[in-house]
Structure formats: C-alpha cells, structure tokens
Image (spheres, grey):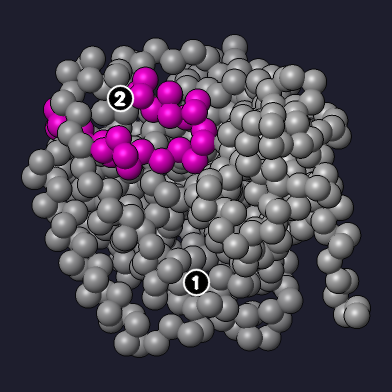
Amino acid sequence: MDVAFHVGDIAAAVTSGRTDAVSVARAALARIDAYAAIQPAVWITRIADADVLAYARRVDARIAAGEVLPLAGVPFATKDNIDLAGVPTTAACPDFAYTPTISAEVVERLITAGAIPMGKTNLDQFATGLNGTRSPYGAPACVFNRAYVSGGSSSGSAVAVAAGLVAFALGTDTAGSGRVPAAFNGLIGMKPTKGRWSTTGLVPACRTLDCITVLAHTIADARAIDEVVAGFDRTDAYSRPREDRPVATRRIGVPAPDQRIFLGDSTAARLYEQALATLAADGAELVEVDMAPLREAAMLLYGGPWVAERTAAALPLLDTHPEAIDPTVRAIMESGRSVSGVDVFEGQYRLAALQRIADAMWQDIDLLALPTTPTIYRIAEMRAAPIALNSNLGLYTNFVNLLDMAALAVPAGWRDNGTGFGITLIAPAWTDQGLLDAGEAYLAAAALPPPPPLNIEDSMETVKLAVVGAHLESMPLHWQLTSREARLVSATTTASTYRLYAMANSTPPKPALIHVGEDDGAAIAVEVYELDVAAFGSFVVEVPAPLAIGSVTLADGSTVKGFVAEPRAIVGAEDITALGGWRAYIATLPRPGGS
C-alpha cells in the first residue's frame, strides 16, 4: 500500500492498523536516502534515523493507548528558519546557527497531532529571495527539470514534498516564499492570514508580515494541517484569534489585458488564459481590476521602509560578521540601514491609503485569481542577474501580506520543459477556509494532466538568434547568452542588405543594424545562437530601445531572429558598414589607458 503522499491516507492507515508509524517512517527514510544522490541540497539537517523511529514508536504507542491523532504517522519537513527542539536552526547561515530547546508552536502542534519530523530543509538565506539559489548549502532545483530554479525561499520544503520524500512541509511566506515554489513544483501552497498560525519560534524576515505556510499535494492535505495548527498563541505578539469568514466565488478579479505581464513566457500566458476560461465555465464572472495600487503596495516591501525589517532580523551578524551573509542577501539587508523613522511613518501612511483602495476593491469582486509568477528562470540565469530576475518572480505576490490578505497557490498546468505554472487565489483576511473550497472547486473543474516525470529532458522548442555587437563572444553583454545556456550555431554574415552603425552615447558601446535593401547594403558579421523559448523570452525582455528583436536574413537566405534597430538609433551614429562587423570597429577604438 502506497501512502507516501497524502496526509489523510497515512493517518487513516496508521490509525486503523493497516500499517504503523514505524513502517511509514522507514519508507520515508528510504526515499530520502535515495533522493539524496539526485538533489543533496534539499536538506540542511536531517534528523538521525534512530530519532525519527523514536518519534514513530511514540505515535504507535499513543495509538495503541486509544488516542485519536489527526496526523498519525505523517512524515513532514520543516524549513530551517523554524525551530525544532534539539536540532540546529541555521536560516541557511552557518554563523547564525543556534540549537533551540523548544520547538516552534506550529511544530509542537504538529508533533502533538502525531506527525513525524524528518529534518530541516534548505532555503534562501534568512528567507530573503524567491528563487532558491541563495544558500551556502546549495541550490535545490525544480524537481521536474533541474536546470530551473525550485522557487524560494521555501526551496527545500517544496522539493521534499514534490519529490515524494514527505507528505507535507512547512515553509514561510513574507513576499511569496511559499507560493512561488509551490507553482514551479506543482504543489498547493497555502499562505494563511497573518496571525492565523503562530510565528513563535520563527526566525523573522519581516516580523510584522511573516507567515508560516504549508506545501502539500492536495487541498485536503493543506486543510488538515490548517485544522491542526491554526489558532491563537498568547506567546506570539502578532497572533490573532482565529476567524473563518465565508468567501463567494461569483465575481473573480483578474488583471486587465494590458496588465497581464509574462515577460515573454508565452506558455505561462496561455496557461493563465486556460485557467480563467475554467473559472468562467464554472460560473464565475471575470471582473477586470486595476493592478497599479497593488503593485505600488508591493514596491514598499523592498523599495520602501519595510526592507529595514530584514536589516533588524540579522543586525548583530550584519554588524559583526557581514562576510558570513550571502552577498545578494547582505546587499538587501544593508540597504535597510538608510531607512529613517520618517521613512517608516511615510511608508505606513501610504500603505494605509493603499489599504483603503484594496478594501474598496472587495466591493466589486469576491476574490482575485492571478498568475503566481509571470515566468520561471534557469538557475544559471538567476545567478547571472540575481536581483532583477528574483524581483520578477514577486510581481504578483509581494503585496499580499502588506495588504492583509489570505492566499492559496494551486497548479494550473505544465510548460513544455516540465516546470509548473500556477495561479493564486487571493481574498481578504480570514477567508482561508473559503479559499481552500474555491481551490478545490477550481482543480476539480480544471482536470489538469498529471505531473510530468521527475526531471524530464528539456524538450522545449528552440529559437535561433543572430547577435551583431555587444553580445558577441568575449564582448561585454555575452553573459546574457551564456547565463541562458545559449548554444553557438554558427559565425556567419547577414545577407548584403544591411548597414551597421555605432550608436551615439551607448554604454557599453552598441551597434544598430538597419535593413536598407540590396542596392545600399552589405554583408555584416554575426554570430547565431540557439536558445530555448523561455530563455529567449527572458532575453528579449532585457533588450532596451531603440534596439529591438526582429527577423534578420542571413547570407544563405535563411531567416532568424536577431537584433535590429529603430530609425532613431542612427541619430548621431557613425556609419561603420565598410568595416564589415562590430569586432573590426572595436579594434579601431583606443584601448583604455592607451594613447
């Protein structure tokens, strides 16, 4: 009997005597051992086998004594910024590590309900990131295609569940850290209302906004965890008495078409449209909403005074051992030092005004249905541009906690490369149970295909791209291709129908390729690269005007995508067509420091 994945199945089997907690724990340990050779970066600290089995034996003894345990024998993982008694908490920073003597309140409630902790999972350091690459313990990758990020900051927790190592895992979510990895790995990511779940025993990221979350395979699993851990905790200054408010699903807010941003990911755009069609076919009225106020609120998290909360969370270490902190995380934390008291109050005033706008929005809609993320990135891409690409992943998530909303991330399909796409249902505070109902109804109506095999080959279609200037090999922007694993196809020339200009006031220097026809043109040297569609889309987003990506005809008559330019690009530019290519032009320039 396979009870590896579902919380209710495991608890029912253990409670009825069809299996026992020790057998479930042994099976989980075997799966964890096997997967360690595939993704060793999932865990920061695994609990010793003997200790796991000791937890399981206590569960079996309690069942034998007649106790009713809603999570009897269910193995789970805990993100390593949440305390588990006797096990180090690192927040993915070894120099920060400490060993707590008591568990976080939510962990204690899970263990009391019969769940079995298996270990502490990897994360973006200090829960600062949405991608999963900011950890000295390695970068967990998407279980379906390990070239791509797992999502973060609850990276290890998502992988542990999606790979079938545990039935559920605790994550955290301040800016989307539970929802983003849920989307990429085909999971349910429940971000409860602030204060619904205790945060006692959590290393804070932004203490006023932090939520502990659950990643699970099914709505029923998430609901079972919420029933166990939700509730007031007098030891948590931000805990609130539990409420359960109904939420209708008749009017669903969606971005206006011109505010649906997918950063070149056409598959994500198509899957989102399919999700909206499912909601509409199930009887919902889709109501367009203005995303601008929500995105302004989102900007306050990293671009406003709330960044100082991240500084406060690790200030002693930042002051004494800054080199111990991941460089990207450290840069974010250091930026909070310049926030003044005036900045904080002005930020609060603006947020209060935006909260009024958001409150008024609920008069016209019952809930929001947004893409969880606009796209996904390869690990290599993320490491090449860690701030900009990480920010893109939070486009639809960062405002939720600031505006006191509940959210539920659910799967919405699969890209051709195997990575998951998801939508997030969002509603006012305390609608958590209603969102679970709405998510269940959506998934039943959507009838999504099953997940792909773990780590399928990347079979996405490819695009050929001709580059003519700063993206050539050894040139200043070539990294934008290598970080996307672009493959050199050929070094060739265009058809004899182009002129090449060195644009004025361009840093780094860039050319403009202009199609002029056979009478006035010449053959210009280019390099042709092959990229996957998603990588090509993310590349195109970064191309600044007056440059653009269009179609370029090569010397052999074939047509590929390539750099072209608007007419304004040649204003004040130097015509360098006679040189035959950009390298020849660069060779004519004075070397830095030379005469």
Please say if 417 is above or below 543.
above
Q: Where does the image place residue 345, in percent across and percent down from the top left?
A: 28, 81
Q: Is residue 250 left or right of residue 451?
A: left
Q: Residues within 10 Å of mark 1 (few under 14, many from 20)?
A: many
Looking at the rendered structure, which numbered label has been put on residue 532? none
Residue 250 painted magenta: yes
Per the image, label 2 sits on a secondary structure element best described as: helix
- Dividing the picture into quarters, in which one does residue 18 lie? top right
Q: Where does the image place residue 367, in percent across and percent down from the top left?
A: 21, 38
Q: Where does the image place residue 84, in percent across and percent down from the top left?
A: 57, 56
Residue 78 painted magenta: no
Q: Earlier in the sequence, mark 1 or mark 2?
A: 2
Residue at horizontal 74 percent and vertical 44 percent from the top:
468
Q: Quadrant of the C terminus?
A: bottom right
| Magenta stretch, residue numbers | 247-275
Q: Quadrant of the N terminus?
A: top right
Residue at horizontal 53 percent and vertical 47 percent from the top:
567
Badge nearest the viewer, 1 or 2: 2
Per the image, label 1 sits on a secondary structure element best described as: helix
Q: Nearer the viewer, residue 567 or 437?
A: 567
Q: Which residue is mark 1?
A: 310
Q: Is residue 34 visible?
A: yes
Q: Is residue 93 visible?
A: no
Q: Nearer the viewer, residue 507 or 565?
A: 565
Please say if 207 is above or below 291.
below
Q: Nearer the viewer, residue 310 or 67?
A: 310
Q: Where does the image place residue 38, in percent across and percent down from the top left?
A: 78, 33
Residue type at tag 1: Arg
Q: Which residue is mark 2?
A: 276
